[in-house]
Amino acid sequence: MASAWDRAKEMAEKHSGSGMFLRLTNDGDRVVGVFCGDPDPREMHWNGEIYEECTGQACNHCAAGKKPSLRVAINFWLAAENAVKVLEGGTMWFRDVLAVRDKYGLDKWTFEVKRIGKANDPKTRYSILPEERIEPALRVRIDACPLHDLASLGRGDAYEAPEQPGTGTVDDATAKALLGELRALPRPEVEKFFAAFKIGRLRELKAVDVPEVRAYLAHAAGDSTIPF
């Protein structure tokens, strides 16, 4: 049974600014709702405990050689509460949001967002699947809920470390480096490469496959036009 201190902590979080953030903290946690309004992207630095916003040219983290990571917040109407919360994630999470937006349209469906990964596991990912079409009556309920002003929110209280790049596709820098290596291959070898890894463009390559890719590449001379 929760103690009085535990209950007080839960109530304090509910009534504080952080209570507006929607947290999926454990493997299998899921919510159903609707993505609303425009996203708010920010470049942030993880200091080992919390995120700190990158300040650009005057940023001490950048000066120390630490690259910022993308954090994107968006309003999310939570069906279970008939209220709008703030859902935030990193690059891979937002790419999935973009994918369902392009395929289904965010204003036409409710979506299930499910966590796949234990608490504090940086390899955690999220599945985003359409749940049901939004009927006119539901749209009225959603539109009646005010959205949060994302630009005014502090976002440094993230509760776990950033995603690991290995769970997604390669970044542009890695893709460009591989491009240089592939250009040293004869065209037939390049075609075999894309067939072996089942990709049409280098940026579709999974980051976890990079070590295998480097082992695959030969150092033969040649030149090819590589789909980047």
Image (cartoon, rainbow, N blue to C red):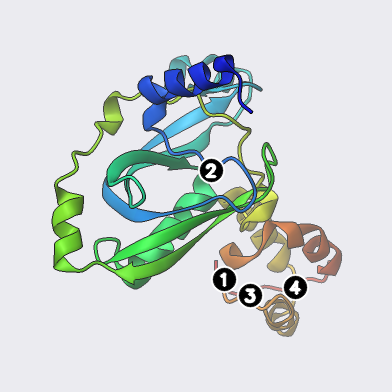
Is residue 208 shown to the viewer in this render? Answer: yes
* Crowd around label 1: few <14 · some 14–19 · many ≥20 (10 Å): few
- What residue does disc 2 label? 24
Residue in the picture at 44% in, 40% down: 88
Residue in the picture at 20% in, 61% down: 138
* Crowd around label 2: few <14 · some 14–19 · many ≥20 (10 Å): some
The amino acid sitting under disc 3 is Ser
Say which label, 2 or 1, has the lower sequence index.
Answer: 2
Viewer-side residue, 94 vs 133: 133
Question: Residue 29: x and y, percent?
Answer: 56, 50
The amino acid sitting under disc 4 is Leu
Quadrant position of the N terminus in the picture: top right
Residue 118: image quadrant is: top right
Of helix, strand and loop, which one carries label 3?
loop
Q: Which mark is residue 224?
A: 3
Say which label, 2 or 3, has the lower sequence index.
Answer: 2
Question: Residue 61: x and y, percent?
Answer: 57, 19
As drawn, is 23 to the left or to the right of 177?
Answer: left
Q: Which mark is residue 185?
A: 4
* Cα separation between marks 2 and 4: 45 Å
Contact flag, marks 2 and 3 (Cβ < 8 Å): no
Contact flag, marks 4 and 3 (Cβ < 8 Å): yes
The amino acid sitting under disc 2 is Leu
Q: Which mark is residue 157?
A: none
